Image: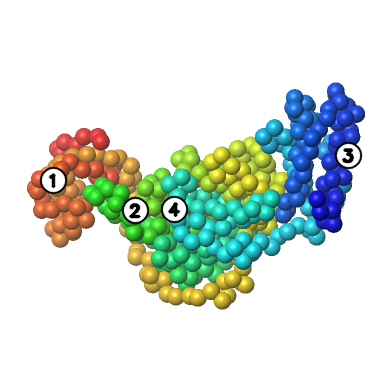
């Protein structure tokens, strides 16, 4: 074992002190503790294996802000030790002082960006292994939470920058609740759909665009099956400071739909927010349920940690800030130092015009209705239904709507199909006497 690393020495001292006092009966009966140490980038960890004594050891060290554990830590630390069970071990995790912390994990150090499949190199774990995150069927969306200065913006920039390196597969939509100060620097990287949305009206327009894409993709799926989406780029929406925008009902509704329904349409969200409280997500728990991937940077308190991680342990309020994080994917929790992407990477990056100079203006019907009711019915019924529902839209619009829905002339006899209908439309159809049946 290398002994010229002061962090190793500190950890070994701590282990010895702990083993001695446990053997002398610190927590009741004398315990023989096997120990393992981990020199993480931002924290050192001691894992104590004490078999059946683990419960007692945990209780002894975890209570009172780890007051007992602090007595054995041989280095000057700021912040809080974390004590929790990790497998069969009692784990004591303590931040390094600034001069021993490793806060510069750049892309070149983790081997450049991964190509394809919606992945990005997010950070390194405490053993120095690269953590590759991704958006997929498995993890459609990520919640990135943290207090001010914790590293949300840097994490989002790192992901966005890597998505842009894969521009033929990714369409990137940027929404910034802090006037563009966070994600503005990504503007013009390849793959951007439109300008960075920095206010509520633009955020509505951008999100409505995404939702229209989603609807079109669902229609393709309905008509032609999953094959229809192969070759279409994934759409990734990056939010910085979501809490600043969520009070707008249209933003909230459009976001809710993307989170609930984006996965099948290959539409994904990385949501950075300071306050991952239930309130910030409205009263709809589905918002949170769909954010399967979690990057919890330092948060302010235990309650915020619980929401950020979806679990009460470990404690993200004990993290050290500046990219120190718990990364949670189903079945795994990693303490990570997030990749640092800043001017050094962004200044020389090639730029181009976004695909759209302006976002098309959104219309109230883009977010006024919930497309959550699915009904199946025949093509003829659908055609008549659309006529009723769209009465007043004019014939050209109607024909266009039918074409978009994959239908031929009104009255053409097509197989039963699925369509996502708004509740108001459904009510209008029912009122007009059309018989619909639930799929
Ligand atoms: N992954 C990282 N590696 C190294 N340093 C980082 C990392 N993330 C953040 N930092 C440091 O912390 C500072 C704040 O990070 P960032 O701007 O991402 O925080 P934030 O969570 O977006 O906070 P704010 O509320 O201020 O927007 C950065 O300027 C940088 O110095
Ligand atoms: Mg920020």
Disc 4 secondary structure class: strand
| Mark 3, residue position | 17
Query: Mark 2 falls on what kind of element?
Result: helix
- Circles 1 and 3, Cβ within 8 Å, touching? The answer is no
Indicate which disc residue 268 carries.
4
Identify the image quadrant of residue 102.
bottom right
Q: Name the image quarter holding residue 310.
A: top right
Q: CA distance from mark 2 to mark 1?
A: 23 Å
Earlier residue among tags 1 and 3: 3
Depth order, front residue of 392/187? 187
The answer to whether residue 298 is above or below residue 416 is: below
Q: Residue at x 69, y 63 (%)?
A: 104
Percent coordinates x, y for residue 290 in the rendering: 47, 43
Query: Nearer the observer, disc 2 or disc 1?
Result: 1
How far apart in space, not on screen, are marks 3 and 4 (Cα)?
Answer: 48 Å
Distance of label 1 from label 3 (alpha carbons): 78 Å
Reading the image, the residue beneath label 2 is 214
46 relative position to 345: left or right: right
Query: In this rendering, does residue 5 appear at all?
Result: yes
Residue under circle 1?
414
Q: Tell me the mark number nearer the camera, choosing from 1 and 3.
A: 3
């Amino acid at each position: 074992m290398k002994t010229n690393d002061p962090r190793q020495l500190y950890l070994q001292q701590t282990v010895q002190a702990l083993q001695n006092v446990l053997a002398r009966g610190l927590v009741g009966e004398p315990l023989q503790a096997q120990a393992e140490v981990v020199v993480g980038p931002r924290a050192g960890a001691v894992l104590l294996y004490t078999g059946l004594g683990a419960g007692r050891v945990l209780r002894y060290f975890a209570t009172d802000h780890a007051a007992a554990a602090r007595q054995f830590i041989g280095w000057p630390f700021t912040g809080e030790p974390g004590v929790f069970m990790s497998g069969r071990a009692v784990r004591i995790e303590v931040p390094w002082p600034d001069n021993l912390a490793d806060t510069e994990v750049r892309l070149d150090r983790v081997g450049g960006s991964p190509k394809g499949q919606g992945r990005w190199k997010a950070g390194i774990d405490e053993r120095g292994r690269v953590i590759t995150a991704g958006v997929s069927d498995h993890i459609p969306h990520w919640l990135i939470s943290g207090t001010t200065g914790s590293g949300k913006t840097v994490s989002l920039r790192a992901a966005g920058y890597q998505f842009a390196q894969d521009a033929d597969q990714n369409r990137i939509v940027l929404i910034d609740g802090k006037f563009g100060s966070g994600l503005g620097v990504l503007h013009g990287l390849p793959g951007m759909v439109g300008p960075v949305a920095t206010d509520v009206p633009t955020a509505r327009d951008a999100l409505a665009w995404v939702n229209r894409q989603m609807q079109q993709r669902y229609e393709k799926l309905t008509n032609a099956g999953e094959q229809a989406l192969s070759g279409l780029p994934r759409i990734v929406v990056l939010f910085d400071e979501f809490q600043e925008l969520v009070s707008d009902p249209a933003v909230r509704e459009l976001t809710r739909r993307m989170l609930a329904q984006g996965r099948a349409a290959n539409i994904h969200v990385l949501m950075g927010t300071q306050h991952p409280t239930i309130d910030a997500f409205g009263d709809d728990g589905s918002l949170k349920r769909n954010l399967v991937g979690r990057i919890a940077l330092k948060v302010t308190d235990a309650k915020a940690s619980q929401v950020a991680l979806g679990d009460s342990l470990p404690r993200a309020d004990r993290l050290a800030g500046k990219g120190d994080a718990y990364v949670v994917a189903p079945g795994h929790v990693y303490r990570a130092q997030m990749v640092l992407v800043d001017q050094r990477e962004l200044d020389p990056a090639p730029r181009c015009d976004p695909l759209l100079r302006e976002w098309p203006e959104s219309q109230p019907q883009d977010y006024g209705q919930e497309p959550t009711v699915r009904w199946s019915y025949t093509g003829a019924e659908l055609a008549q239904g659309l006529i009723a529902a769209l009465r007043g839209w004019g014939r050209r619009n109607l024909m266009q709507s039918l074409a978009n829905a994959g239908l031929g002339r009104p009255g053409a006899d097509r197989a039963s199909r699925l369509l996502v209908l708004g509740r108001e439309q459904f009510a209008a159809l029912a009122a007009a006497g059309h018989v619909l049946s639930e799929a």
